[in-house]
Amino acid sequence: MRPLIARRETGPVPLPRPRPDPAPSRLTYRAQRLWLTPLFRGLLRVGLPLALVLAPVAWVVTDEAKMTAIREQVAEIRHEIEGRPEFRVNILSIEGASPAVTEEVRAALRIELPMSSFDIDLAALRERVEALPAVLSADVRINGGGYLSVTVAERVPALVWQTRAETVLIDAEGEVVAALADRELETPLPMVAGRGAERMVDEALVLFAAARPLGDRLLGLVRVGERRWDVVLREGPRILLPADGARAALDEVLLLHDVQRILDRDLVRIDMRNPARMTVQLTPEALETLQQVRSGVIPPGEERG
C-alpha cells in the first residue's frame, strides 16, 4: 500500500512589494545641482560664516555712540600701559662724541625727558643726528633702565679747506666737518684752498705726504682751475704742478732741491706744468743781478743766489 502524504493547502500567493523609485525628487535634484556650483559652495562655507561674524561688527560700527565709547576705552587702556614706569625713558646718554659734538647732538634731538618709549621715534632721531655735518653715523636705541642711548661716529678732520666765505675742516671724503673757528685741533692739519679742492682730498694727502721733508716751510696746496695743484711755501718759490703726474713732478723738484738747494734760491716760482721742461721765474732782485752779470757790471761769481 502507498504511504499517505499529508498535503498542506496554501492560500493565494501575495504579490511582491514594489521597489522605491531611485530617482530623486525634483526639489532634491535642484538642491544637488545647486550644491555642485562652486560659487554656492563658497557662499555657504565662507560667505555665511563671514556674514555672521561681520554683522555684529557692522552693527557696532554704524552706531556712533558705541564707536566713541570704544575709542575712549582703547585710549584709556593705551594711556595706562604707556604710562607704566617700565616704559618710561628718563636718561639720555650720548657716547662716542667730543664735547662740542655732544652739545650739537643734544640740540638736534630736541627731546624732553622723561617720556614714554611709545612716543619716541628712533628712526627720526637717528636722521636728525646723522644730518649734523660732524656726524658720520649714529645708532639710537632704548636700553633697559629707561636709558635713551645715542652712539655717534664722528667725521675725522683730514684737511683745513680755505674758501672765499670761510675756513672749514673736511674729512677724507671731502665732507665738511665744522668751521675751523668752532673746533679746537689737537694737532695742526694741512691746508688746501681753491674751488674743487674738497673733491681731490686723496690726491692732496698724497702730495702732503711727499712734501713732508719740507717741514714747516710748506704752507699748503692751492687748487687751480679745478684741475691741478700749486704748492705754496712759506720761504721759497711757488711750485706749479701738472694736472697729471703731480706726485712725480713734486718728487723731481724735491730731488733737485736735495742736490742743488733750488728752493733756497731767489725764485718766484718753479713751473712743472710741462714735466719735460722745468721753467723757473726769478725774483726781481735776482733778475737784475743776472742782467748785471751778463752786462759785465758784476763779475761772474759775485752774483747773489
Image (cartoon, rainbow, N blue to C red):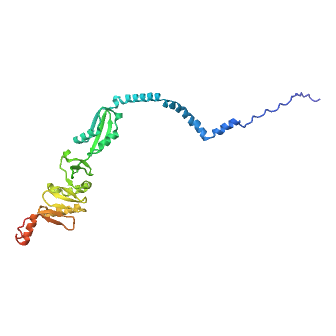
State left or right for residue 293 relative to residue 24.
left
Where residue 35 appears, x then y in whole percent? 63, 38
**The image quarter in which residue 275 lies:** bottom left
**The image quarter in which residue 127 lies:** top left
Where residue 11 appears, x then y in whole percent? 86, 28
The quarter of the image holding the C terminus is: bottom left
Q: Which residue: 21% across, 54% down?
A: 192
**The image quarter in which residue 262 lies:** bottom left
State left or right for residue 206 relative to residue 81.
left
The quarter of the image holding the N terminus is: top right
Where residue 159 appears, x then y in whole percent? 22, 51
Q: Which residue: 29% across, 42% down?
A: 129
Q: Which residue: 17% across, 66% down?
A: 279
Q: Is residue 101 above or below residue 232?
A: above
Q: Residue furthest front?
A: 64
Q: Residue furthest right?
A: 1
Where residue 265 appears, x then y in whole percent? 11, 63
For the question of whether residue 222 can be seen, the reply is yes
Labels in figure, total: 0
State left or right for residue 303 relative to residue 81.
left
Q: Is residue 251 above or below residue 142?
A: below
For the question of whether residue 261 can be seen, the reply is no
**Viewer-closest of 255 and 193:** 193
Q: Is residue 114 above or below residue 97?
A: above
Q: Which residue: 23% across, 61% down?
A: 246
